[in-house]
Image (cartoon, rainbow, N blue to C red):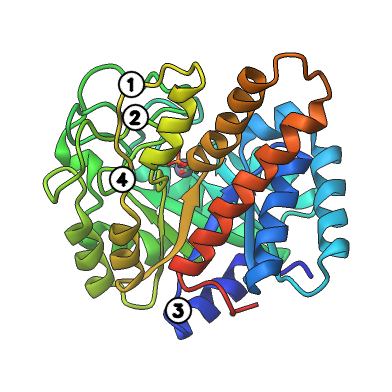
Amino acid sequence: ALITMRQLLDHAAEHNYGVPAFNINNMEQGQAIMEAASEVDAPVIMQVSRGARGYATDIMLAKMVEALARIYPNIPLCMHQDHGNNEATCMTAISHGFTSVMMDGSLEADGKTPASYEYNATITERVSRMAHWVGASVEGELGVLGSLETGESAAEDGHGAQGRLSHDMLLTDPDQAAAFVAHTKVDALAIACGTSHGAYKFSRKPTGDILAMDVIEAIHARLPDTHLVMHGSSSVPQELQDIINQFGGEMPQTYGVPVEEIERGIRHGVRKVNIDTDCRMAMTGQFRKIAMEDPSEFDPRKFLKPARDAMQDLCRDRFERFGTAGRA
Ligand code: G3H
Ligand code: 13P
Ligand code: ZN
C-alpha cells in the first residue's frame, strides 16, 4: 500500500532504524527493490529523479508503481520525487500519485548553482505548504552536497558549480538547520556532510576530515525530532568495482560511504539514506559479465535478469544493515 514518507520516517524514528531510498528508472529496478523488501519484510522508499521522469515518462512510472503496489500488497511503499528543482516539478509529481517530494533549494533551479539561504527557505516553504495541503510529505535540503577533498559540488550532471566551494557551504550548520526546519516545516531534512553523488566520492577510504559524520551528530543534538536524510550514500563496494573492471570496464579506483558510517548516522537521526550508484553498479557488472562470457547472447532478458538479481541482493543487504528488515 502507498504511504507517505512522514508516516514511514516517524515509525523509523520511533524504532531507531533507517530506510534506504533507492532510485528507479525502469521496471527491473522496481522489481529488484520490491522483491528484496518482500524477502525481508521491509518498508520501501522508491525515488525518481527528474532524469528518470524524462527517461521513462510520468505515465509509465506512475503505472509501474501502481503495479508494484498491487503485486506486493503487504509492503508499505512511499513514492518520492528525488531532487525536485522547483514548484512545478514537485506538484506534477504529486499529481501523478507520488506521496512525497524533495524540494532541493540548496541549488538554484538550474540544479547547479549554489543558492542563497533566502532562496532556499522561501521556495521550500512554498512547496511544503502546497504539498501538505494535499497530504504529501516534503524533504528539504540545507547545505550543498560536494567533496571536502576537492571543493567540487555535486551537480546533477556531475560537472559541478564553477570553482571550489568552501567548507562552510559543504557542511550544514546546526543552528541554520534549526531555523530552516522551523520556517519551512519540512518532514525531513537532507544535510551536507561531505558526500556527493555518483561513484567518485573519495580518493581514499574516508576519515572524519572528508566524511563529517560529527556534523550529523551535532545537527541531531540540535534537532532531535527532525528526520535527517543522507544523500550520496552509495558505498561503491570494492567487489562491484572489481566485477565491472574484470569484465572490460575501466572504472578508476574509488571509495564511497562505508556502510558502518551510515549505521552510525542512523544512531544519530538519519532516517532516509539515498542510494542509486550502488544499484547501477550492481546491474552494470552483470551486463558486462554476460556480454563478455557469452558474446553470442542477444536476448535482453539474459542480461536483465542477472542484473536485477544483483540489484536485489544489494537492496536486501541494505535493508538488513539499516534495520529496515522486519519493519513492514
Ligand atoms: O540525484 C542523483 C541520482 O543518482 C539520480 O541521478 O539524475 O542521473 O537520474 P539521475
Ligand atoms: P549515490 O550516487 O551515492 O547513490 O546517491 C544517490 C542520491 O543521493 C540520490 O538523491
Ligand atoms: Zn541526492
- In three-dimensional space, the C-alpha distance between marks 1 and 2, rounded to whole angstroms, equals 9 Å
Image location of residue 281, percent across then percent down:
52, 34
Disc 4 is placed on an element classified as loop
Q: Residues within 10 Å of mark 4 (few under 14, many from 20)?
A: many
Q: Is mark 2 within 8 Å of ligand 2?
A: no
Picture layout, residue 277 above or below residue 185: above
Where is mark 2, residue-wise? 200
Mark before the other along the chain sequence, 1 or 2: 2
Q: Nearer the viewer, mark 1 or mark 4?
A: 1
Q: Amino acid at mark 1?
A: Pro
The residue wearing badge 1 is 252
Tell me how far mark 1 sits from mark 3, CA to CA.
Answer: 38 Å
Q: Which of disc 3 and disc 1 is earlier in sequence?
A: 3
Location of residue 113 by image quarter:
top left
Q: Is residue 59 above or below residue 227?
A: above
Q: Which circle, 3 or 4, is nearer the viewer?
A: 3
The reply to whether the C-beta atoms of the residues labelled 3 and 2 are less than 8 Å apart is no
Rendered residue at 51%/60% (across/down): 317
Numbered label attached to residue 274: none
Residue plotted at (28% across, 70% down): 220
Q: Position of residue 229 (x, y in %)?
A: 42, 58
Q: State how far apart marks 4 and 2 are (Cα).
A: 19 Å
